[in-house]
Amino acid sequence: MSTNMVSFKELGLVNTREMFAKAVAGGYAIPAFNFNNMEQLQAIIKASAETKSPVILQVSKGARNYANQTLLRYMAQGAVEYAKELGWENPQICLHLDHGDSYELCKSCVDFGFSSVMIDGSALPYEENIALTKKVVEYAHKYDVTVEAELGVLAGVEDEVAAEESHYTKPEEVIDFATRTGCDSLAISIGTSHGAYKFKPEQCTRDPKTGLLVPPPLAFDVLHEIEKKLPGFPIVLHGSSSVPQEYVEIINANGGKLPDAVGIPEEQLREASKSAVCKINIDSDSRLAFTAAVRKVFAEKPGEFDPRKYCGPARDLMVELYKHKIVNVLGSDGKAA
C-alpha cells in the first residue's frame, strides 16, 4: 500500500455491493450519473438527497484527467458532506470509474479513493478480457472496491471509447465469465448505445405524427436469457440516455445543431429496471440539459458574461432531470432513507 493511498471509506463513500443486492431484490435500478464539472456534481447530490436515492457518481478516464485526480478525491468527500448538509443523514454515494481501459488506471483509482471501478476489456478477445478483468478484481477486492466488467460491445462514441458496431452479449458466455473473473457486476450489450446519436436514421423508423426518429427496441430476449443463466447477478446497462427532445429543440432553436439525435425510450428503461438490471448509466441527457440552459441564456441575454448566471440555470435544469430519472424511470427514490 503506497503512503498516499486513501480508502473510499475515509471519504464517506460506499461500494456497490449492498446497493445492487437491494436493487435486484427490490426491482429497481441505481442511477449512475456521469459528471464533468461542479454544477453537475451539485445537481446529482441535490436530486439524490431530495429523493433519498442511492447514487453512483461516474467519472470517465477523460473526466478524471479534466478534473485532476486529487481535486476529484476531495470533491467526492465534499459531495458526501454536502448531502448530509441537505438533510440526508446516511448518504449512499459511490464513486465509480466508468470505462477503465487498463489495469494501471483501475489501480490508480482504487488508490485515490474510488469505491468502484469498471474494467472494460470488451474489445479484447474473450480470454484476454477474462485475464485483464480477473487481475483488476484481485487488486480491487483487497481494498473492498467493487468491479464492473463488460461483455459484448456497445456502438457509439463516449470519452475514450469508440466502436463502430454493437455485438450483443452472448448469454452462453456469462456464467463462465462471471465465475472466472469474480467481477461484482456485468455490463451487457442489448442494443443501447453511447452518445447523443445512438442510432443511424436507417436503423430507426419515423413517427408520422412528429417526424421524430423511433429507435429499434432493446433485445429483452437476450437480457432474459442472461438472467436465467445468472439469477440475481447485477447487470448494468450503458449508453442509456433517452435524449429528451425538449432539450434538443431548445439547443437547435438557440443556435445549436443536433439533427436526428435520439435515445433509449424511458419505458424500455423502466422495464429493464424491474429485472436484474440494477445500474443504468446516464450521461448524454445531463449534457443536453446543461447545454440547452446555457444556450437559452446566451440567446436571450447576449450581454451576459457571469458564469453563475448561465451555469446556475443549467444546474437547476439538471436537478429536475435527475429527479425525474430517479422517480419516474429507475424507481430508486426512498431506497436510501
Image: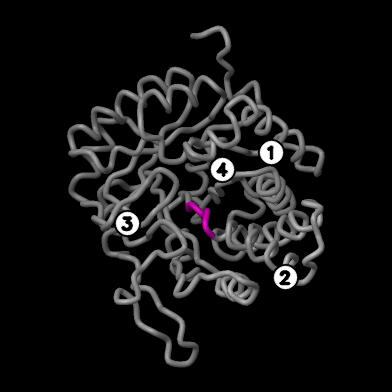
> For the residue carrying disc 2, how many other residues have a C-alpha within 10 Å: few (<14), some (14-19), or many (20+)?
few
> Which of the marked residues, 1 or 3, is nearer the chain's N terminus?
1
Q: Which residue is mark 4?
A: 56
> Which of the marked residues, 2 or 3, is nearer the chain's N terminus?
3
**Residue type marked 3:** Ala
Q: Which mark is residue 155?
A: 3
Q: Secondary structure at mark 2?
A: helix
Which residue: 30% across, 65% down?
Answer: 219
**Residue type marked 2:** Ala
> Which of the marked residues, 1 or 2, is nearer the chain's N terminus?
1
Q: Secondary structure at mark 3?
A: strand
**Residue type marked 4:** Ile
**Residue type marked 1:** Pro
Q: Is residue 234 magenta?
A: no
Q: Position of residue 228 (x, y in %)?
A: 27, 53
* Quadrant of the rendering where the C terminus is positioned: top right
Which residue: 73% across, 49% down?
Answer: 46
Q: Which residue is mark 2?
A: 299
Which residue: 76% across, 58% down?
Answer: 310
Count of numbered marks: 4
Q: Position of residue 166 (x, y in %)?
A: 27, 57
Spatial separation of the CA atoms under disc 1 and disc 4: 11 Å
Above or below, 184 relative to 139: below
Spatial separation of the CA atoms under disc 1 and disc 2: 38 Å
Spatial separation of the CA atoms under disc 2 and disc 3: 34 Å
Above or below, 130 relative to 87: above
Which residue: 81% across, 60% down?
Answer: 304
Label 2 or label 3, whichever lies nearer to me, is 2
Spatial separation of the CA atoms under disc 1 and disc 3: 34 Å
Q: Which residues are magenta?
A: 280-284
Residue 271 or residue 258, whichever sits in front? 258
